[in-house]
């Protein structure tokens, strides 16, 4: 059984997320996409996993723009778990929230296809947002990188990280 994070770490994490998150005004039309969240062995409460989605959305642009999020995202799923990936551990991560963003089949705000990424519409894009240490998220697929404004687009997955000043 995986060790749970010490309670002090969770308290600090809660203060860090709730204390520094920029307010995201809801001015775009359309419904919010469904969010499914979970956490391995009670690592963090569901409400905190939802906050990670908000933080990710604030840093991943243009995908995170409210108009795009509400019109082109079909569903979001996120799962918190301990992190054992060497490349993540090397930057201080002990845990991560794995975020999957399912895009609609016919996009209205994002392009359905680009020459650099191929087909974007209908894909599920995956990201790993990690903590503590140097907080940020990795984008693995070229389409995942593109919709978050990461440049240059490429296949060297661990080169494509966005640091988030949480």
Image (cartoon, helix red, strand yellow):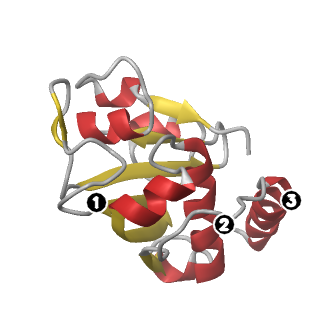
Residue highlighted by disc 1: 103
Determine whether 151 is above or below 111 in the image: above
Q: Is residue 6 left or right of residue 123?
A: right
Q: Which one is in front in this view, the residue at disc 2 or the one at disc 1?
A: 2
Residue at x 26%, y 22% (from the top left corner): 154
Whichever of callouts 3 and 2 sits on the residue coming sooner in the sequence is: 3
For marks 3 and 1, give the CA distance: 30 Å
Residue at x 44%, y 48% (from the top left corner): 63
Q: Is residue 95 left or right of residue 152?
A: right
**Which of 127 and 106 lies nearest the eye of the viewer?**
106
Classify mark 3: residues with Cα within 10 Å, few (<14), some (14-19) or many (20+): few
Quadrant where the N terminus lies?
bottom left
Res 38 seen here = yes
Residue highlighted by disc 2: 26
Whichever of callouts 2 and 1 sits on the residue coming sooner in the sequence is: 2
Residue 79 spot, x, y in % from top left: 43, 70
Determine whether 157 is above or below 83 in the image: above
Residue at x 43%, y 28% (from the top left corner): 150
């Amino acid at each position: 059984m995986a060790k749970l994070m010490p309670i002090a770490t969770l308290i600090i994490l809660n203060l860090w997320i709730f204390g520094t998150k920029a307010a995201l005004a809801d001015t775009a039309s359309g419904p919010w996409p469904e969010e499914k969240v979970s956490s391995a062995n009670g690592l963090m409460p569901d409400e905190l996993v939802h906050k990670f989605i908000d933080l990710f959305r604030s840093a991943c642009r243009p995908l995170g723009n409210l108009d795009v999020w509400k019109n082109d995202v079909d569903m979001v799923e996120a799962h918190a778990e301990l992190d054992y990936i060497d490349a993540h551990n090397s930057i201080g991560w002990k845990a991560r929230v794995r975020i999957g963003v399912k895009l609609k089949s016919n996009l209205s705000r994002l392009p359905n296809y680009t020459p650099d990424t191929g087909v974007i519409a209908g894909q599920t894009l995956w990201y790993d947002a990690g903590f503590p240490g140097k907080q940020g998220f990795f984008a693995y697929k070229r389409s995942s990188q593109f919709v978050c404004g990461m440049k240059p687009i490429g296949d060297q997955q661990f080169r494509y990280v966005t640091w988030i000043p949480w």
